[in-house]
Structures are given as C-alpha cells and as structure tokens.
Image (tube, grey):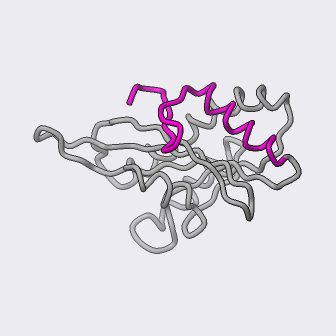
Amino acid sequence: MKNNCFYNPSLGELSLNQVSLKIAEFIRAESKDTYRLVIGSDSQERRLNGKKELNLVGAVVVHRVGKGGRYFYQKEKRRKPHSIREKIYTETFFSLKIASKLLPVLNKELNGKKPYELEIHIDVGRAGETRNMIKEVVGMVNGNGFKAKTKPESFGASKVADKHT
C-alpha cells in the first residue's frame, strides 16, 4: 500500500480526494439522515526480519446512524514505541493527522456544509494499562477542537482500525 493512500475493502486503494468524494456521495445519497464521521487509530507491534516495528492503522468511518456505514483505512510502519504511553500518543496523533488532512478536503467537497458529527476515537479505557492516560489524550483531542470517545464507545479505533493492524 502506497504512503498517504487509503484502502476500502470494496473499492480498493483510494487517494484522499477520492475518499472525500466517496464520503460526500454516501452522505448525499440519504441527505436527511444523521451522520457521524469517526476517525480512530490502532497499532500492533510486529517483527519483520528480526526488527520490531509498529504497524499503525488509521480508520475513517462514515456512519449513517441506524443504517450502517462505510470505512476507509490507512497504514504506516513506524519504529517500535518505547512505552504504552508512546504507543497511545502515536495512535492519537495519527488520528489527528488524518483529521487535519481529510476535513478541509471533505468540507470543500460538501460545499462548506457539515452534515456530520465528528468524533476522534481513542484506544484507551477505564480498565487496563491505559486508564491513567484518558485525561491526557482526551485533552489533546479536545484541545484540537474535536470530540473524543474512549472505550467502550471508541469502535473506530478498537474495532475498525484494529481489524487491519
């Protein structure tokens, strides 16, 4: 998969502009419905040729509430993080990076209208190692002007992105 390209299981490899167009078409097809635009990331450590690296996946989900949705994902390889904190920060920054690139293009495609509620899904929750990081990463997402969701509501990260790590 090429760098900065997205992938959809039905449509294959897509550019950022093509993803924006497909999301806009999906919304326009049923314009009276309610939509959520979800961006979430997950990562897994992999060993390749004896070298540990991080397989990072960012997912973009357009959800027609109560009626299904469509998703796209992007992959990157990164060096292995030194700690769980670094791993979660890497995932969160990746989601914010995708949002910062996608939203201007998508909003232009939608003629400045924003018929969706945007959520950044973070792979942290009240149980497990990440519970002490919730305030930090939610604050980071909110500080960038976005609404954050954590486990168990963060399906964009913990289900969709996780499926492709």
Q: Residue at x 33, y 36 (%)?
A: 78
Q: Report the residue that reaches farthest toward the left.
A: 50
Q: Taking 151 as reference, is 95 above or below it? A: above
Q: Residue at x 85, y 30 (%)?
A: 112
In the depicted view, which residue is nearer to us: 27 or 10? Answer: 10
In the depicted view, which residue is nearer to us: 84 or 110? Answer: 110
Q: Residue at x 57, y 61 (%)?
A: 154
Q: Taking 78 as reference, is 142 above or below it? A: below
Q: In the picture provided, is 96 more to the left or to the right than 106?
A: left
In the depicted view, which residue is nearer to us: 46 or 19? Answer: 19
Residue 115 screen position, x and y as percent: 83, 44
Any magenta on residue 45? no
Any magenta on residue 8? yes
Residue 110 screen position, x and y as percent: 81, 32
The magenta stretch is 1-30
Q: Quadrant of residue 56?
A: top left
Residue 66 screen position, x and y as percent: 74, 65
Q: Taking 105 as reference, is 143 above or below it? A: below
